[in-house]
Amino acid sequence: MTYQSFYNQWHHLACFSTAQVRAIYPIFNRRNYSEWQKAGYIVPLRQGWYAFADYVNKPDYARYLASKIYTPSYISLHTALSFYGIIPEAVVAITSITTRKTAQFENVFASYSYQTIKPSIFWGYEPRQLSDGKTFMLATPEKALIDLLYLYPQYSTQEEMRELRLDEDFMLNELDKERLLEYTTRIGSPILTKRVQLMLKIYGL
């Protein structure tokens, strides 16, 4: 198969796995991957995954790839909080939630980190659309906060909670408190409930 014919068939997906290609073309020559990579046509994402090189500089494709190369997953934690402007820091690594084992990958798009939660807590995310119509999965602001408080035990004191420097305007005017409490009740963790109540107390909610 020529690169041009492969490009014409797969390019619209932005990325692909060797398993996907093998399912359609059982006799596909795997040497093509290394040759196309050397030629600068494709770039490696993780073992068995590649992206077309012309997507590297396209806006938001680092986020788009996060839930493609490790499924199921959705972007949450510090990355989602930064996306919504809830924390002041610009987050370099893309942090996601998954039901699979904890994992980390690094490629030309970004550093990716995946934290494990139970399948019963794997919800509270929605698709966000790119300019070309593709979507990536992103936690709601309330679920991003819940995921953070659930997974990071250090946020159990006022001092540690304040160090998050959550945006006060967001907390007072944009946070959906009803949804936050609904999520907290749904999870049913006494420790999480205590942390959420502490956060709300700090911001007078």
Image (cartoon, helix red, strand yellow):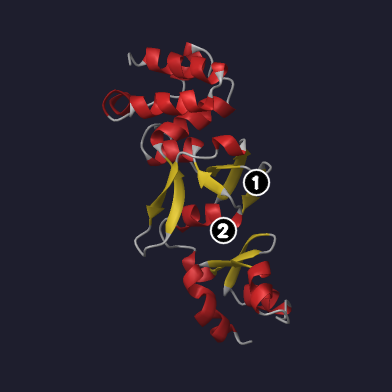
Q: Which mark is residue 120?
A: none
Can residue 113 be seen in the rendering of this structure? yes
* Element class at badge 2: loop
Local packing at callout 2 (Cα closer than 10 Å; few below 14, some 14-19, many 20+) is: few
Q: In which quadrant of the rendered view does residue 19 lie?
A: bottom right
Q: Position of residue 55 (x, y in %)?
A: 48, 66
- Disc 1 secondary structure class: strand
How far from the left and from the top, in percent, is residue 201? 39, 12
Q: Relative to the observer, which residue lies in front, 192 or 119?
A: 119
Relative to 150, residue 193 above or below: above
Please state if 5 lies on the left or on the right of 138 as rendered.
right
Q: Position of residue 174 (x, y in %)?
A: 29, 30
Left or right of 199 on screen, residue 148: right
The residue drawn where x is 40% and y is 42% is 83
Residue identified by numbered label 2: 108
Q: Which residue is mark 1?
A: 104
Separation (CA) of disc 2 from disc 1: 14 Å
Q: In which image quadrant can residue 171 be found?
A: top left
Q: Is residue 166 above or below residue 75?
A: above
Question: Circle 1: is it few (<14), some (14-19), or many (20+) Cα within 10 Å?
Answer: some
> What residue is at 61 percent from the left and 66 percent from the top?
50
Residue type highlighted by circle 1 = Gln
Mark 2 vs mark 1, foreground winner is 1
Could you say where residue 81 lies in the image, as x and y percent from the top left? 43, 36
Q: Nearer the viewer, residue 45 or 139?
A: 139
Quarter of the image that includes the C terminus: top left
In the image, taking residue 61 as reference, residue 129 lies left or right, namely left
The residue shown at (58%, 47%) is 112
| Kind of residue at disc 2 | Val
Give the quadrant of the N terminus: bottom right
